[in-house]
Image (tube, rainbow, N blue to C red):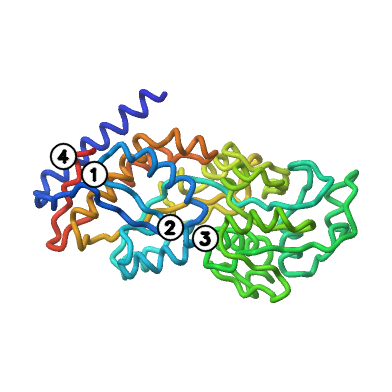
C-alpha cells in the first residue's frame, strides 16, 4: 500500500509540475543559504511543525521558525503578511480567503479531548457527554458528584468537590472546535456563548494562554477539567475522558476514532474541508475531531520565500507521514493531498505567473 501511495503521489506531482511548466512560470528568485521561513498560529499543530522543521534541517538552505501563538494570532499575522505562513485549526471561509488573497489546505487530523485532574480515577475511566460538558463550562454543573455525571458512571466513586474548569484565554482553534461541538449539542450554548476562537467565559472560570499552559495548570489543579489537542494528551500523559458520540457510543480519543469521523465527513467523500468535523456519524467516531490548516498568500510578495515555504510543505506531505504517525495524528488522505498539490500550483508571483517550485530540495 505504501508503494502504491508513493507512486500515486509522484504521478500527481509530475502532472502538476508539467501543468506549471506549460503555464510558463517566471524564474524564481534565488533561495539564499540560511533563509529563515517564519510561520505562526495553532499551538495544537506546534509539535508537528517542530518535528518537520527539525527533520528538514537536512536542507542546508532553509530553516523553519514557527511560533505557536494560537490560531487567531496566526490568521491575523498572515493576513497582515507579517509571516510567510499562518496555521489555524479552523478553515477560513472561501469569502475570507478571496478577500485577503489567501489559500489554505489541511496538514493533519487530530481531536480535541476533555482532560481532568481527578485523583483516584484511572486514565479514560470517566465518561462524559456533550450535555454535561455544556453544563460544566456554563457553570450549571459545579460538583463532580452531580447526578448527571454519576448517572453516566455507575460504580465510580465521585468526589463531592467543586469542578474547576480551565479554558483558553487566547484566540484558539482548539477553543473554536470545542465550542463548535458544544453548539451542535445545545441550542442555548449556540445562542449565548456560541462558536469562536475567543469566548466570553465567565470571570469565575480559570483562563490561561496556550496549550502548554493548559496542560501544566491542569496538572497542578486537583478537581480541574479542560480541553486540549490530543497531541498534548499523549505527550503530557493527561487523564482523558471517554465521550459519548452521536451514535450513543462512549469513545476513547485516538487516531482510529479521528479517522472514523473523517471517513464519515465531506472531507473524505467530496475533498471538501470547509466544514468542521464536529459530531460526525459513525459508531467509532470521536465527536470533537478537527483538522489543522496551513494558510499561504495566493500572490507571493517575495517569490523565493513563497517557493521555499511551498517546498517545505510538499516535503512534509511526501516525507513527513512518519512524523504525523509518531504524534498520533492522522495523515491527510491521498485524494485530499492531490487537491492540496493543485492548490499550491495556483499560487502566483506579482505578475500572475505560477511559481516554479518544482525543483524539490
**Between marks 1 and 3 in the image, the one whose residue lies nearer the viewer:** 1
Circle 3/circle 4 CB separation < 8 Å = no
Separation of marks 2 and 4 at Cα, in angstroms: 35 Å
Q: Which sits in the foreground, 121 or 247?
A: 121
Q: Earlier in the sequence, mark 4 or mark 1?
A: 4
Q: Earlier in the sequence, mark 1 or mark 3?
A: 1
Residue 311 in the image, given as x and y percentages of width and height: 27, 44
Position of residue 70 relative to residue 233, above or below, is below
Separation of marks 2 and 1 at Cα, in angstroms: 20 Å
Residue matched to label 2: 67
Q: Earlier in the sequence, mark 2 or mark 1?
A: 1
Residue matched to label 3: 173
Q: Which mark is residue 196?
A: none
Label 1 environment density (alpha carbons within 10 Å; few <14, some 14–19, many ≥20)? some
Residue at the spot 40% in from the left edge and 25% down from the top edge? 2
Residue 222 in the image, given as x and y percentages of width and height: 78, 56
Residue matched to label 1: 61
Helix, strand or loop at mark 1:
loop
Circle 2/circle 1 CB separation < 8 Å = no
State which quarter of the image contains the N terminus. top left
Residue at the spot 47% in from the left edge and 62% down from the top edge? 69
Circle 1/circle 3 CB separation < 8 Å = no
Q: Which mark is residue 18?
A: 4
**Between marks 3 and 4 in the image, the one whose residue lies nearer the viewer:** 3
Residue at the spot 31% in from the left edge and 45% down from the top edge? 312
Q: Earlier in the sequence, mark 2 or mark 4?
A: 4
Q: Which sits in the foreground, 194 or 200?
A: 200
Q: Earlier in the sequence, mark 2 or mark 3?
A: 2
Amino acid at each position: 500500500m505504501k508503494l502504491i501511495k508513493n507512486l500515486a503521489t509522484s504521478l500527481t506531482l509530475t502532472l502538476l509540475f508539467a501543468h506549471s511548466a506549460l503555464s510558463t512560470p517566471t524564474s524564481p528568485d534565488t533561495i539564499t543559504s540560511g533563509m529563515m521561513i517564519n510561520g505562526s498560529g495553532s499551538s495544537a499543530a506546534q509539535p508537528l511543525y517542530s518535528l518537520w522543521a527539525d527533520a528538514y534541517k537536512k536542507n542546508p538552505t532553509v530553516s523553519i521558525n514557527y511560533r505557536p501563538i494560537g490560531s487567531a494570532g496566526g490568521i491575523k499575522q498572515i493576513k497582515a503578511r507579517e509571516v510567510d505562513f499562518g496555521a489555524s485549526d479552523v478553515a477560513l471561509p472561501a469569502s475570507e480567503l478571496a478577500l485577503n488573497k489567501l489559500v489554505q489546505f489541511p496538514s493533519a487530523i487530530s481531536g480535541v479531548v476533555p482532560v481532568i485532574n481527578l485523583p483516584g480515577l484511572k486514565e479514560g475511566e470517566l465518561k462524559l457527554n456533550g450535555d454535561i460538558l455544556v453544563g460544566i463550562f456554563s457553570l450549571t454543573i459545579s460538583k463532580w458528584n452531580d447526578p448527571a455525571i454519576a448517572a453516566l458512571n455507575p460504580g465510580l466513586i465521585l468526589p463531592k468537590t467543586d469542578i474547576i474548569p480551565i479554558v483558553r484565554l487566547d484566540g484558539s482553534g482548539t477553543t473554536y472546535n470545542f465550542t463548535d461541538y458544544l453548539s451542535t449539542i445545545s441550542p442555548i450554548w449556540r445562542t449565548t456563548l456560541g462558536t469562536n476562537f475567543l469566548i466570553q467565559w465567565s470571570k469565575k472560570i480559570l483562563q490561561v494562554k496556550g496549550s502548554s499552559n493548559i496542560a501544566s495548570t491542569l496538572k497542578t489543579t486537583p478537581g480541574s477539567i479542560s480541553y486540549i489537542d490530543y497531541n498534548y494528551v499523549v505527550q503530557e500523559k493527561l487523564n482523558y475522558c471517554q465521550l459519548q458520540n452521536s451514535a450513543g457510543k462512549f469513545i476513547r480519543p485516538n487516531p482510529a476514532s479521528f479517522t472514523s469521523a473523517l471517513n464519515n465527513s465531506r472531507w473524505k467523500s467530496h475533498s471538501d474541508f470547509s466544514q468542521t468535523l464536529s459530531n460526525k456519524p459513525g459508531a467509532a467516531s470521536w465527536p470533537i475531531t478537527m483538522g489543522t490548516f496551513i494558510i499561504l498568500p495566493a500572490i507571493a510578495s517575495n517569490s523565493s520565500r513563497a517557493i521555499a515555504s511551498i517546498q517545505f510543505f510538499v516535503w512534509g506531505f511526501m516525507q513527513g507521514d512518519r512524523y504525523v504517525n509518531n504524534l498520533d495524528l492522522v495523515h491527510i488522505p491521498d485524494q485530499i493531498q492531490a487537491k492540496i498539490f493543485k492548490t499550491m500550483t495556483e499560487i502566483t508571483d506579482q505578475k500572475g505567473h505560477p511559481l516554479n517550485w518544482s525543483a524539490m530540495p
